[in-house]
Image (tube, rainbow, N blue to C red):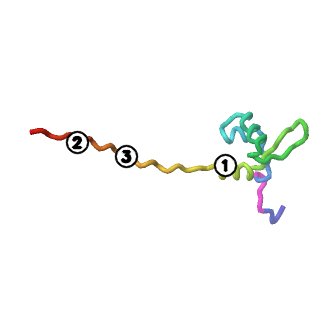
Amino acid sequence: MPGNTHDQRDSHLLSVREVAEHLGCSQANVYGLINRGCLPVIRVGQSKGYRVDPHDLETFLRQRKVQYEAAELVVPRPRLKHIEL
């Protein structure tokens, strides 16, 4: 459709299996995220289960991205012993 800013790929909803592959986890983990309300889904009939909007998946990933600061490297100083002459 002319003037549509979304291409065909943007409208493709992801299955639980596809989400699991994208996240590198099991489908059970994806169902757990869905059941806890962490990942929004679209319910599709009784037998087809859930579908995930790719934009919702990207939002989910962006919200959980963390960056750890590198800990300063602390080099222990040698203990100085008294020198007896």
Query: 40 or 49: nearer the eye?
Result: 40
Q: Is residue 71 magenta?
A: no
Question: Which tag is nearer the camera, tag 2 or tag 3?
Answer: 2
In primary-sequence order, the first of circles 2 and 3 is 3
Q: Which mark is residue 74?
A: 3
Q: Amino acid at mark 1?
A: Leu
Query: 62 or 10: nearer the eye?
Result: 62
Query: 39 or 19: nearer the eye?
Result: 39
| CA distance separating discs 2 and 1 | 51 Å
Q: Amino acid at mark 3?
A: Val
Q: Is residue 6 magenta?
A: yes
Residue at the (74%, 33%) spot, across then down: 28
Which segment did they paint magenta? 5-9
Q: Which residue is mark 1?
A: 61
**Residue that sits furthest to the right in the current view:** 46
Compared to residue 26, the image places residue 43 above or below, namely below
Q: Amino acid at mark 2?
A: Leu
Q: In the rendering, at what x and y percent does residue 15 appear? A: 78, 41
